[in-house]
Amino acid sequence: MKFTRIYLIFFVLLVPELKAFAQADISMATHWNNRANYNPASIARTDYLYLFSNLRQQWLGVNGAPRVFNVQASQYVDKIRSAFGLSVVGDKIGAVNSFNPMATYAYRIAKHQDWALSFGISAGVFSSSVNGSLFEPDIANDPFIYYGKEKSIRPDFNAGVEFQNSNFVLGVSSTHISSVFKTNNLYLNTNHRYGYAIYKNTGSKFFNYNVGLQVVNRSDLTVMEINTIFRIKHLTGLIDGLREVFDVGLTYRTSRQMTVLFGVNISSNARIGYAYDHSFMKGYNPNGTHEIVLECRFLRNAASTRLKCGDDLFWYY
């Protein structure tokens, strides 16, 4: 099946007057490394500055296909057991542009390094605009198509809770809380509910691995996702010990999508990754989705690991 821009707009967005589908949360395959987009509690990491960015090009070769960029920065301050973060998400789908800057705060409870419980909230704005002049209908001057320009800016809030110990990460969260009980329309990002569980194992001499399950619900749609990632380790010396050097992973969603993930540790504090999505839905087979990610951390002091649930060398949680 070959899509034109007008088909994409009608299937995904429709026109504003129809009060149809609200926009969905961004879909990033690499969210298993950074959950801050949907759970603000997850930024309460060990005492370091954390930087994360990724770029996603969906359905390559389809006119008007989604393109998403995401930039985040967060800092955990051990003295007050609090984390502060900033994020910016941009999402372009055909003639629709969305922009979502957010500020995040998280508080972490921990009596020792074996477990931690974090609470987080994000606040910002969700801006959405439509440029109808970009539509390319098969029928010139089609009266059912909106050709004007519209823009809306609304307050936006996310909230979540996350529990960690040395082997498990459990979280629940809700995004776009300000849209709860509101009529869906083109300028509104609908409320989503997330729940996830991750098992992580760092006991092997040659690799670490984790297995995760996530459930996402919005309106009457529920999607489940299962993920596994292996992180290969390398012996660097008697002082440094084992360090991760690269990782491979696989994800499957009940929306009939599979993702292959790759990553390389440029250094002990910097990583670059790539993900490729393949859809098993009829018509999308030749249109793959690509995503690249860069993440870095900057340690503040050697004592910053006392609230870390796990080895400081394996810092992705």
Image (cartoon, helix red, strand yellow):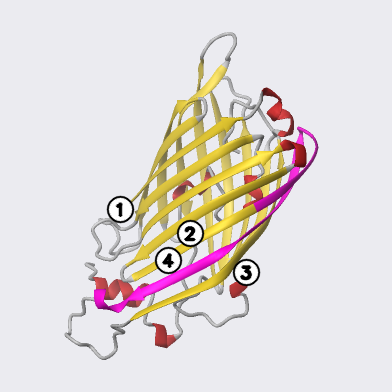
Residue 255's image quarter?
bottom left
- Say if residue 39 shows up in the picture: no
Which residue is label 1 attached to? 288
- In the picture provided, is 8 more to the left or to the right than 54? left
Left or right position of 257 against 37: left
Q: N-terminal of the two: label 1 or label 3?
A: 3
Q: Position of residue 21 (x, y in %)?
A: 45, 77
Amino acid, disc 3: Ile
CA neighbours of label 4 inside 10 A, class few (<14), some (14 to 19), many (20+): many
Q: Which residues are magenta?
A: 105-134
Q: Position of residue 18 (x, y in %)?
A: 42, 87
Q: Is label 2 in a helix, a strand or a loop?
A: loop
N-term mark: 3 or 4: 4
How far apart are the alpha carbons under marks 3 and 4? Answer: 17 Å
232 is higher (above) or lower (below) than 41 = above
Nearest to the eye among marks 1 and 2: give it: 1
Mark carried by residue 177: 3
Amino acid carrying label 1: it is Gly
Provide the major secondary structure of the magenta segment. strand
Q: Is residue 107 magenta?
A: yes
Closer to the camera, 154 or 46? 154
Q: Nearer the viewer, mark 1 or mark 3?
A: 3
Q: Which mark is residue 254?
A: 2
User: How far is mark 2 from mark 3, CA to CA?
Assistant: 25 Å
The answer to which of marks 2 and 3 sits earlier in the sequence is 3
Q: Residues within 10 Å of mark 1 (few under 14, many from 20)?
A: some
